[in-house]
Image (cartoon, rainbow, N blue to C red):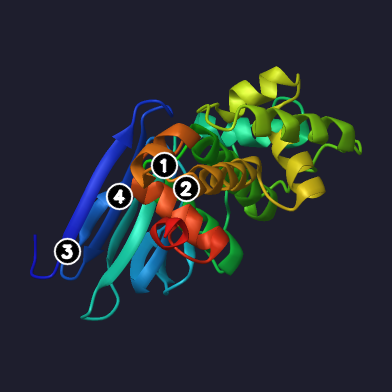
Amino acid sequence: MGVGEQAKFWRDPAVHGLELLHARYVTHTFAPHMHEGYALGVIEQGAEQFWYRHANHIVPQGSIFVVNPGEIHTGSAVEKEGWKYRVLYPDATILQEAARQIVGKPHDVPFFPDPVVYDPELARQIADLHRAFEEPVSALERESRLLWTFSQLVLRFADDHPQQKALPNDQGRVQQIRAYLEENYAENISLKELAQQFHVSPFYLLHSFRRHTGVPPHAYQAQVRVQRARDLLRLGIPIATTAQQVGFADQSHLTRHFKRIVGIPPGRYRG
């Protein structure tokens, strides 16, 4: 690789072999190529340019790019400083499933007519989703971010603008889900398992939970875990042991959530 360039590539076999790339390129130029699935990414620094569908496109910092399956495209830097980005390569069936859950019935593979879009909120969601596959997060967080991010992409930018299926005001069910998460806070339950537990679709659960609580279920789960961690820390339980007992992957994972919610790291809280 060129000077100052670096690239990390990996795949997650649990999600249809989802491939991910986190890279910085300066002099590297991608030859014309295509992917079986989508190429979806966000530019963190600099700007990338690429030829796609008979035109050249520039993706500045903070923007999103979407390349549809089977489409020939290139990639290179706009300026000499290069560019840094996060990219996901989801199989077409993943986006198709997100569209199906939105409308509540079978749906074609979504097509995105605009290869470059500026949507700061969605760009942040894509970056957070990418990081969720780079860090030891819960199954609930990973699946929730995946479905929510891709469903928002489809709702906002797919060519057919699918109409979201009307959802009833199901506050009672949301209260039951909250109680379940509070009782089973240390379990690494997935979004799919949680939806099956309450006989709803994952998208329905996500949408309803966010509407009634203001946060997604994985964020609620993390808050419950932090509260239980506070109880254990006040008893003098070591931080690493506390992290394990409340369901976090490790001490650093507990520390990150604890500081974000409580305002100080668990070491200072424990005293």
Which residue appears at 26% of the width and 81% of the height?
A: 79
Please state the horizontal and vertical placement of residue 2, each as a whole percent of the image. 8, 65
* Mark 4 or 3: the one toward you: 4
Please state the horizontal and vertical placement of residue 71, each as a whole percent of the image. 41, 46
Which residue corresponds to mark 3? Answer: 28
Which residue corresponds to mark 4? Answer: 21
Give the mark, 4 or 3, whose residue is nearer the N terminus: 4
Residue type at tag 2? Leu
Task: Label 1, secondary structure: give it.
Answer: loop
Q: CA distance from mark 2 to mark 3?
A: 50 Å
Q: CA distance from mark 3 to mark 1?
A: 51 Å
Which residue corresponds to mark 1? Answer: 237
Query: In terms of depth relative to the viewer, which is nearer, 18 or 206?
Result: 206
Are the two marked residues, 1 and 2, in contact with CB atoms closer than 8 angstroms?
A: yes
Q: Is residue 204 above or below residue 200?
A: below
Give the mark, 4 or 2, whose residue is nearer the N terminus: 4
